[in-house]
Amino acid sequence: MMKPTPLEQIIVAMIREDGPIPLDRYMALCLGHPVHGYYMSRDPFGPEGDFITAPEISQIFGELIGIWCAAAFQALGAPDEFHLIELGPGRGTLMSDMLRASRVMPGFRDGVRIHLVETSPALRKLQAARLGQTITWHDSLATLPDGPSIVIANEFFDALPIRQFESRNGQWMERRIGLGADDRLVIGLSAQHLDRPPGTDGDILESAPLRDDIARELGSRLAASPGVALVIDYGHAASALGDTLQAVRRHKFCSILDRPGEADLTSHVDFESLGNALRQGGALPHGPITQRQFLLSMGLEARAALLTQKAKLPERNVIGRAVERLAGENQMGNLFKVLAATSPGLPTPYPFGSP
Ligand code: SAH
């Protein structure tokens, strides 16, 4: 058996001291422990990393979102100064592609102030190198300035910790991480009161307290200052029971208990809850629609055709495959959803609300 990771040793000591910990605490440690957390020290994206995200698949993804931002800028009345905020910007690829595409809109480039909400020092470094312009970083939404804003979040909410409850003998139990034989991590259950009737044995209910808090905070920002937000993530349009927590290491699924700190842990975003939390904060949610619907409406095919025309043969195939991956029915196209939110009083942004 492999030696436990440094983070595993820390977690084992923690549990020995205080008892089993809920999943959200475990996830927060695995992803965000200041030294050993998954995002804190490494670049997890791309072919050599553990997973690949839409902006890393093709520049077209960010360009189409940049065009969406340019339209949002107009809907906000083309302010002289506005905040372009990205939550969890990864390598900075999406922001870079968005900025290139939105430059065509007069006034955008002069008015834009870039804010990145990012907790990982390693990724902040990559973002600085990639963007090479004035950026303000934030640890959370709390320090973002007031004023007109456009907020983008791609695969951010799926990385926030969740809790899981399991129905057993007419009672909800919470899944917790405890210690088994040889001090190995195991998943256990402990009684937990929930304000909702228990289901059938084995039903799994997920809740994402931090995700809801952040969505509410975003909602209240949009209620206080004019703005629009776009959230893209994999998940389901309506709340549903089921275990969606997954661990990925080097492009392969593994157990969430394997090599803590070395695997990416994510879960599906419940867009119904996310929309409700935004509304509770005071914003108006629109959608969700599928990523496929969003990208096709934004002109994915025309943009791909133009790039293909300019490209040499091997590259043409790459573009075709990227389009299929981003928008294909059985690929990211349907699994990923896009939700917009606006300040009350602003028009419904295209392509939300269009048939
Ligand atoms: N949007 C990027 C990266 C997605 S991965 C892309 O599409 O490629 C998740 C990102 O969110 C990483 O940048 C990670 O460091 C950041 N992140 C995770 N949890 C966070 C938190 N609680 N606060 C701020 N950023 C966080």
Image: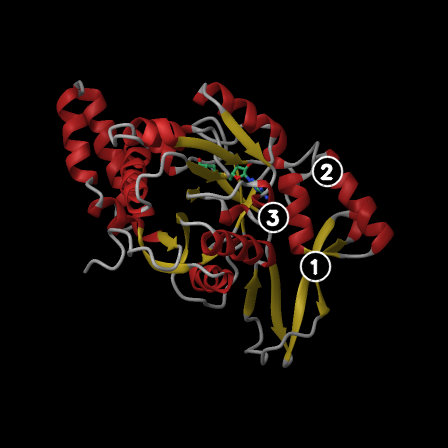
Label 2 Cα crowd, 10 Å radius (few <14 / some 14-19 / many 20+): many
* Residue at the spot of label 1: 176
| Amino acid type indicated by mark 1 | Arg
Quadrant that contains the C terminus: bottom left
Q: Position of residue 60 (x, y in %)?
A: 27, 33
Can you give x and y, in whole percent of width and height, for residue 290 in the image? 30, 53
The correct choice, above or below, for 267 with respect to 31 in the image is below
State the colouring used for the structure image: secondary structure
Q: Residue at x 21, y 33 (%)?
A: 320
Report crowding for label 1: few under 14, some 14 to 19, many 20 or more residues within 10 A (C-alpha): many
> How far is disc 3 from disc 2 in space, using C-alphas?
13 Å
Task: Locate residue 340, reporting x and y percent.
Answer: 36, 53
Q: Is 144 in front, or is 168?
A: 144
Q: CA distance from mark 3 to mark 1?
A: 12 Å
Q: Which residue is mark 2?
A: 7
Q: Tag 3's secondary structure?
A: loop
